[in-house]
Image (cartoon, rainbow, N blue to C red):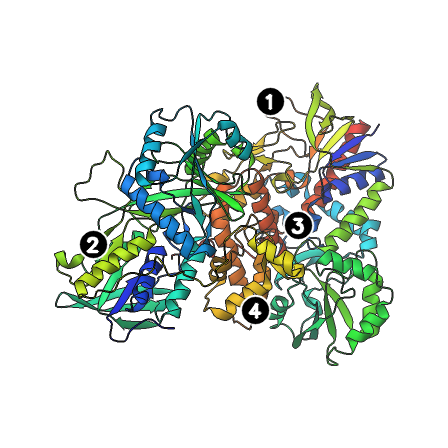
Amino acid sequence: MSKTNKNMPKIIVIGGGATGCGVARDLVLRGYQTTLIEFGDLGSGTTSRFHGMLQSGARYVVSDTPYAAECFRERETISKIAPEAVELIGGLFISLPNDPEDYPEKFIKCCEIAKIPCQEIQIDEVLKKEKELSNNILRAFQVPDAVINSWQLVNLLAKDIKANGGEVLTNHKVVSIKQHNNLVKSVEVIEKNGFKKILECDCIINASGPWSGKIAKLVDQEVELQLTKGSVMVFSHRIVSQAINRCRIPSSNDIMCPSGTVCLWGTTSEIVNDPDTTKIRPEEIQELLIGAEELFPKIKNYRSFRAWAGVRPLVKPKNFDKNIPLPRSHSVIDHSENGLKNFLTVCGGSLTTHRSMAEDVVNKLGNKLGINIPCSTDTIPISNSKNAKWTPSSYFQKIENQKNFNDVVCECEAITKTDIEEIMKNENLFDFHDIRRRIRVGFGPCQGTFCNSRLAEIVVNHKIDIDIKKSILNFWSERLKGSIRTSYGDQAKQILLSDYIHQENFGLRLTEENSEKDDIRA
Amino acid sequence: MNTDVIIVGAELDAFIASIRLQELGYTSRVLANGQGSYLYSSGNIKVLDFKENNNSDNKTFPFFIEGLPSAHPYKLIGKDNVKQAIEWFFNHQISNKLRYEYFETNTFTISPIGLKIPSYGLYFNQINFENIYNKDITIIKFQNQKDFHAELIAQSIKQYVNTIEILNVVQPDTNQHSDSSSLAISFDNLSSPDNYFFNINKKINKKTSVVIFPAVLGLNKYMEIIRCAEKTFSKKCFEAPTLPPSIPGIRLNKILEREVLKKNYIHRGSHILKANIENNKCLSVVDNFKRIIKARAFIFANGGILMGGIKVKSNGEIVEEIFDSKIQNNNHTKCEKSYETLNALQTSGVLTDNKLKPISNSNNQLENVFFTGRNLSNWNPSLELSGEGVSIASGWYSANNISSYLHD
């Protein structure tokens, strides 16, 4: 049932990542008339380009204790309101011989202050559980880390926004924002198919992450961000059963995090100017591998089938000191100080704290507008399925139960034709990638080698008019773009197999003209 | 375990070499880690996409070879040898058993998604574009068969045909899965194909003149089965390739394997770890069971990077570990674009002389070791569409070279 109220102001949220979706949900639940605008597909920016953790906060507990405490509260809340997107795997903080000796004591103390449950465990017990870990570990601490399926999360949020009367516009690019008398009046957007429209509004919330600066520029405003690119490597199989962190001040190369059927190792950190910088250099892969070897000596024997990079939007404080790490906590910028009365920017923070960020910005919006409706996103579940949870085996279990083995389209992720048809029925999708992001088809170790043409067959069967050659090529070249960065060991074989099937067998041609054009954000 | 030649790998080039050696009077043992890459092929023989991808003035076989770069395996082997090898293959009883049909030039087969694939030889009743121009076509699709893309083929070829329709039929054994292998086995086990096709015939449009089946009509009895279908329908029947694993590839593999096994041995699960070399001669190889296997000459046909004959290390270095051969490394890690990276990986490989003997990183030139197929450098099977051609030519040629080496 719609919760939005015709008498409430019209708010436009720009950005369809976790933050934007969180803000829009908060707005609709408080009754605001809400429209969310996203340039590409939901969660196709930074939201999907990170290591997948729902932080217990322990990672930042020494460097930013209040933020760590916020993370833990949010971890508790998110795992209650969106169990379908969360796997409570637990986490370990591992101290190695070359890590600072005094850090573990600080770590325990700060966890206590931030109220994050933390328990030291015996080394031999750790090694029994995590067989790939180095024998050199000195100390180990158990914390309640979790992982989150970010696409699942944003799609659940979007579903709830729509169910409560909000509007979600994906594949809509903001072209210009019209202002009059220090007030924003409307937003001009252009659809992927070239169709333009004007959306009127009473207020805008800019939640476009690393693109916040670009959006603010449209109205001659400034958002001071420090953009850092972080690269992540994906290893096939779950090498570890829980998130493994280095017990030291968070920096590069210190997390291994299981996610679905795979695990992710990250991250690097490199200052960039352009939020669209997602290219990975070969040296970064070497850097990541060397870092991973300290914790997992045999890591080079495992197949890494993909690497990606995302851009973190950290907020630059006014008196910015280069020697201390930037704070992770978010900030809300009210641009009325610079002459624009109804434009707010929310930035910084993380996926773990997206809900409290939303609560904060919508509270501030309420203060401005004199509307005093309390936030309810911390108690109302995002989806109704009470017993739902996200486990890597949930799709496999479904197939085992239904015995519909013939129906499996994507063997790596156990996605069936029925699952895909369901998605296509319910949503307005542009291309294969939109299907992939919703249902994980083509996500697994073979990276679309075998499911690409099957997917095309299903789409064509639904009388959707596509250019078969172009669609299959696009899907392949996009998957290839990430998987080719780790072309060593068994992955080199896999890439050539994929080439064998697509070029030698299917007769497709990957050329300069059609290679990598299909960037997710471009 | 006395044998003249050890062949490492179970690829097309390995079996061709073994069969050719047998013809020349030498025994061989095939040591294979697992299956070759047939499973991923469509079963047709691609020699080179010489109509489009070539600078040579003369665009017919084998003159097209002249336009290739000088280090290309075809150039090392030589135009006349390539011609002889390909003709040998198509005139051999292995081809006869599969009823390979070959042409003086490339013909276009239909790929699993309906695109054109220039091929030099086609297996028995494989569909090609000549068969469909302006015809009325029915494509048969078995229920739940996800690896045959009837819709995609229909969409892609509809511009060339008069009419086209897809007919969904029940598979011969509904208790079986609907993957290609299960379907092929159930066709082999079909007690009365006449009955089965009789029921299908009732549903086929009277106007149809050409019926296209997925290439799953049996592993062994496919010729009988296709003939039976043609007789029952009174229409031409063809097979179109499926997504791999491919049944025509398995058929080819089986025929080759049987031919090799007539006089020789195939050891599966044997992974070669090192070689014993003395005075520029390889005396024996050692496998993962620590067996020391002696021979007078060795062929390495273990499939290059694709099948693991050559390895890519995590720092991007490409190595051939057994002999530490000189490698053509085209620096795939430095490439910016995906298609460049792929091309660099494909064209990297072992450098050889024009007898296909590897050039060693040390100064010692091995006398009795030969490399073939995807192990070789400076060719790109997926861009040139020359995978089977280079395998046949290099397998045949290395066998000839061994023969003259052992004879001397």
> Would you name the residue on which mark 1 appears?
B362
Residue A333, numbered circle: 2
Dot 4 falls on a residue whose secondary structure is helix
Along the viewing direction, whichever of A134 and A462 lies nearer the viewer: A134
Residue at mark 2 shares a chain with residue at mark 1: no
Tell me which chain the residue with mark 1 is part of: B
Q: Pointer 2 indicates a residue of which chain?
A: A
Assign a secondary structure to mark 3: helix
Q: Residues within 10 Å of mark 4 (few under 14, many from 20)?
A: some
Q: Amino acid at mark 2?
A: Ile
Could you say whether the residue bearing mark 2 is in a helix, strand or loop? strand
- In depth, the one of A323 and A403 nearer the eye is A403
Image mark 3: chain:
B
According to the picture, the residue beneath numbered tag 4 turns out to be: A460
Disc 2/disc 4 C-alpha distance (Å): 47 Å
**Residue A138, picture quadrant:** top left
Whether A69 is drawn above or below A295: the answer is below
Question: CA separation, marks 3 and 4?
Answer: 42 Å
Q: CA distance from mark 3 to mark 2?
A: 71 Å
Where does label 3 land, which residue?
A: B63
Q: Amino acid at mark 3?
A: Phe
State the image coordinates of residue B198 (x, y, percent, origin top left): 82, 74
Q: State whether residue B310 is above or below residue B52.
A: above
Using the rendered view, name the quadrant where residue A268 is placed: top left
Residue B281 pos. (x, y %): 72, 23
